[in-house]
Amino acid sequence: MTMNEVYAAIEPARAQIDGLEGPALLEFGSPTCGHCRAAQALISAALEHHPQLRHIKIADGSGRLLGRSFKVKLWPTLVFLSSGQEVARLVRPNDATEIRSALAQIDPPKG
């Protein structure tokens, strides 16, 4: 799967996330966040070798329950999941290498 460019209009329920099979990347942020926009090229580069990985972009903010359930405080926050369980987390990543390293923990690179 290529990088998801659009934040989900409706956030999934925590039970849906906990029930995911296989590797997934949750990206919490906002389309108006400068840190989030700056991280997009890094995330895209890191996802290049993970074509089957599920990438879910969640628009976070006040009153958004999913972000609170993951204790998100700063954007972007990347949560790396394996079958619904958190394996790694990066807050405001500034290097594609650190994202690749976290991705490798849940999904060995392809290609």
Image (spheres, grey):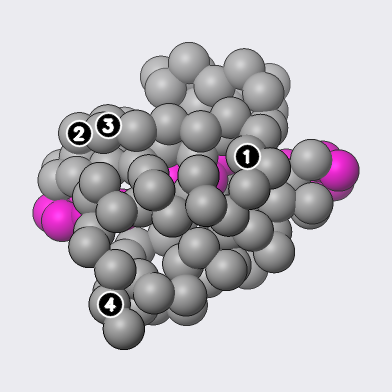
Instruction: Spot the residue most to the front.
Output: 97
28 or 46, which is in the foreground?
A: 46
User: Is label 4 in contact with label 3 (beta carbons under 8 Å)?
Assistant: no
The numbered mark at residue 110 is 4
Label 1–label 2 contact, CB within 8 A: no
Tell me what residue is drawn at x 64 percent, y 58 percent.
42
Give, as a three-letter code, the residue at label 2. Gln
Residue 85, labelled with which disc? 2
Q: Position of residue 67 (x, y in %)?
A: 51, 27
Confirm whether the magenta stretch covers residue 30: yes
Q: Amino acid at mark 1?
A: Pro
Label 4 sits on what residue type?
Lys
Residue at mark 2 to residue at mark 4: CA–CA distance = 22 Å
**Magenta residue span:** 20-34
**Mark 1 or 2: the one toward you:** 1
The residue wearing badge 1 is 93
Question: Residue 33, located in which quarter of the rendered image?
Answer: top right
Query: Nearer the viewer's eye, disc 2 or disc 4?
Result: 4
